[in-house]
Amino acid sequence: MSPISYRDMRNNKHQIKVLHTCQAFPCGEDEFILEAMVRAGCEPICYGCFGGGCGACKMKIVSGEYFPEKKMSRAHVTVQEQETGVVLICCVKPRGNIEIERVN
Ligand code: FES
């Protein structure tokens, strides 16, 4: 797990923790969580379109605030799922430190 650095804090970066792998990476408020995860070389999760359409990056936000910047396909994330924290991480940006985990 990598701690968030002073430089990251100055750049308004938040720490994203992946619970099932115990990995962590910084993500700015202006970037999507999936982009930061790929850049950090974090766990090789599945991803495809980077646009909320394929559903490959579906994960659950266990704690922390986020902003859904792009529309998520309702074929992959229902309203009920989203209410429990399930999102497509290519569509959301953090508003603070976040903990995420895989959705089966
Ligand atoms: S990468 Fe396709 S929905 Fe996120």
Image (tube, rainbow, N blue to C red):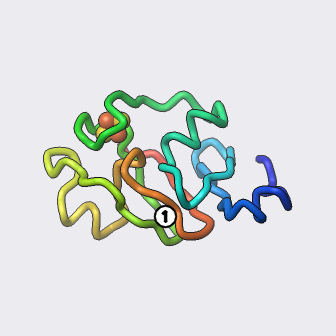
The image position of residue 72, as x and y in percent, is: 24, 51
Q: Give 97 or 1, whichever is nearer the viewer.
A: 97
Question: Which element is circle 1 on?
Answer: strand
Image point 67% across, 59% down: which residue?
A: 13
Rendering quadrant holding ligand 1? top left
Does 3 sit above or below residue 57?
below
Q: Give 54 or 45, whichever is nearer the viewer.
A: 54
In the rendered structure, which amino acid carries the disc numbered 1?
A: Val
The image position of residue 74, as x and y in percent, is: 15, 51
Image point 68% across, 44% down: which residue?
A: 23
The image position of residue 61, as x and y in percent, is: 46, 60
Q: In the picture, residue 84 is in which quadrant?
A: bottom left
**Is residue 56 visible from the viewing direction of this image?**
no
| Residue picked out by circle 1 | 62
Within 10 angstroms of label 1, few (less than 14), some, or many (20 or more) residues?
some
Residue 7 falls left or right of residue 64: right
Query: Which quarter of the figure is the C terminus placed in?
Result: top left
**Is residue 102 visible from the viewing direction of this image?**
yes
Image point 68% across, 64% down: which residue?
A: 12
Image point 28% across, 43% down: which residue?
A: 52
Q: In the picture, residue 57 is in which quadrant?
A: top left
The image position of residue 93, as x and y in percent, is: 47, 58
Q: How many marks?
A: 1
Residue 62 falls left or right of residue 43: left
